[in-house]
Image (cartoon, rainbow, N blue to C red):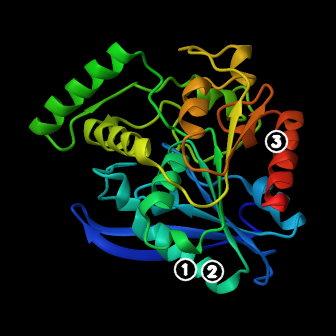
Amino acid sequence: MNLTEDYTSETISLKPDYEGEVIAVLTASNFNTGDRKSILYIHGYIDYFFHPHLGEFFNTNHFDFYALDLRKYGRALLPHQHPNYCKNIEEYFEELSLAILHLKSKSSGVYLLGHSTGGLTASCYMNSGKERHLVDGLILNSPFFDFNQTKLEKYISQCVAKMASKISSYAKVNGVLTPAYAKSIHKDYFGEWDFNLDWKPIKGFPTYFKWVLAIAAAQQSLVHSNIQVPVLVMHSSGSIKTSKFSKQALSNDIVLNIEDIKRIGKTLGNQVTLLEIDHAQHDIFLSPKVVRERALNKMMSWLLSN
């Protein structure tokens, strides 16, 4: 499938926030039929939907497919906004609720599929989101359940974030995320994927301290997680920390620690399945073909049994 020809995007107008006008964008496969179960894909941090092969896989396996660009991300980023900024992860609940209601009106079932920060957002939504009762299952692709830092590093970074954000709501730091991951997936470097570098820059966007605190609070809230639907938590078989690209970046999660994903993932609810994917990258569905196809097929087996 082709992202330009085979998908249609619809703007969702949202309530204005502290920066003014706010929108989200819902993208739908043109091969949806409107009379079967649906998948709603939620992207990660410094990210947006650019995965046409994902929609093709679901359509081929008799699911409708939709993807949401959250406020201040990708297609939904407006000129007056700070990219990827939020003060509270629940800011995204408005567009999630509207998207879920839209899918439910057309579908026999709704499943959320969240990657990285999108996985954290979806998990929080399934604990307290307004329309969570309309969702039949949750799939998490390398969810961002904890910062990939030591306890001391986390303590220091949280203290710095609290102090800096009191001085300015838009206090920020550059270069927190290594460009090694973006280089490992973009076709102009070491990957096979093309994406808009204005929306997903190789060097990333500045990281706002308010965002750091919002993510930390969301992660902490999962201590009391009690998700009532089946949950699939997918993660790589290995993770490494690196500031420069190497071949290991093509077969490991170089963004998050898989031990954090497993530790927290199993506590999300009473119907959790952990699924390890050998040699997967951080975004499992952008891994080399053999790896991602294995992951997609295992995910579909879980879906069909739930």
Q: Quadrant of residue 151?
A: top left
Residue at left 51%, top 60%? 126
Amino acid at dot 1:
Leu
Asked if labels 3 and 1 touch by Cβ distance under 8 angstroms, the answer is: no
In the displayed structure, would residue 163 be above or below residue 195?
above
Asked if labels 2 and 3 touch by Cβ distance under 8 angstroms, the answer is: no
Q: Is 87 situated left or right of 26 in this image?
A: left
Q: Quadrant of residue 36?
A: bottom right
Q: Is residue 269 visible?
A: yes
Residue at left 45%, top 69%? 95
The residue carrying mark 3 is: 295
The residue carrying mark 2 is: 104
The C terminus lies in which quarter of the figure? bottom right
Inter-mark Cα distance, 2 to 1: 5 Å
Q: Secondary structure at mark 1?
A: helix
In the displayed structure, would residue 271 be above or below residue 61?
above
Q: Which mark is residue 142?
A: none
Amino acid at dot 3:
Ala
Q: Position of residue 62 (x, y in %)?
A: 86, 70
The residue carrying mark 1 is: 101
Asked if labels 1 and 2 touch by Cβ distance under 8 angstroms, the answer is: yes
Amino acid at dot 2:
Lys
Q: Is 175 situated left or right of 192 in this image?
A: left
| 236 vs 223, nearest the viewer | 223
